[in-house]
Image (cartoon, rainbow, N blue to C red):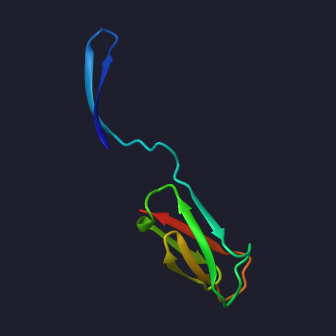
Amino acid sequence: MSRSILLLSDNSGIILRENFTSLMIAGQPTAAIAVDRMNILTIGVDNPITVATSAGGDDKVSVSITGTGGLISKIGAGRFNVRVATPSDDCTISVFAN
């Protein structure tokens, strides 16, 4: 956050001074998920994935899965293991960064 001063001139030429605080985000944070072995998640076996984000360091990233009765565990920097339990046409892997 930065504190700034905005100087404005009204219609009579009087300079108005306004203090404000602003937060600037240079771009939208992004994330990429790659299934390392195949383009599918296979039921009952380890499915390694790689996750990369533009939102900060690896220690700030968490990953979750819904729709398959699956579990995700971290196995290294940017690397996770996914185990799914049931077939699904609606599986979502979400990436969060603090």
Quadrant occupied by the C terminus = bottom left
Q: Residue at x 64, y 79 (%)?
A: 67
Quadrant occupied by the N terminus = top left
Task: Give coordinates of residue 57: x percent, y percent.
Answer: 43, 61
Relative to 58, 9 lies left or right = left
Q: Residue at x 49, y 65 (%)?
A: 96
**Whether residue 60 is situated above or below residue 8 in the rendered picture:** below
Most extreme residue toward the top is: 12
Instruction: Count the labels in the image.
Output: 0
**Whether residue 31 is situated above or below residue 20 in the rendered picture:** below
Q: Residue at x 62, y 78 (%)?
A: 48
Q: Residue at x 66, y 73 (%)?
A: 36
Relative to 2, 38 lies left or right = right
Task: Give coordinates of residue 81: x percent, y percent.
Answer: 57, 80
Relative to 53, 84 lies left or right = right
**Whether residue 82 is situated above or below residue 53 in the rendered picture:** below
Q: Between 11 and 77, which is closer to the camera in this rendering?
A: 77
Relative to 25, 82 lies left or right = right
Question: Which image quarter: residue 12?
Answer: top left
Task: Give coordinates of residue 8: x percent, y percent.
Answer: 32, 19
Task: Give coordinates of residue 88: x percent, y percent.
Answer: 72, 81
Question: Which image quarter: residue 24?
Answer: top left
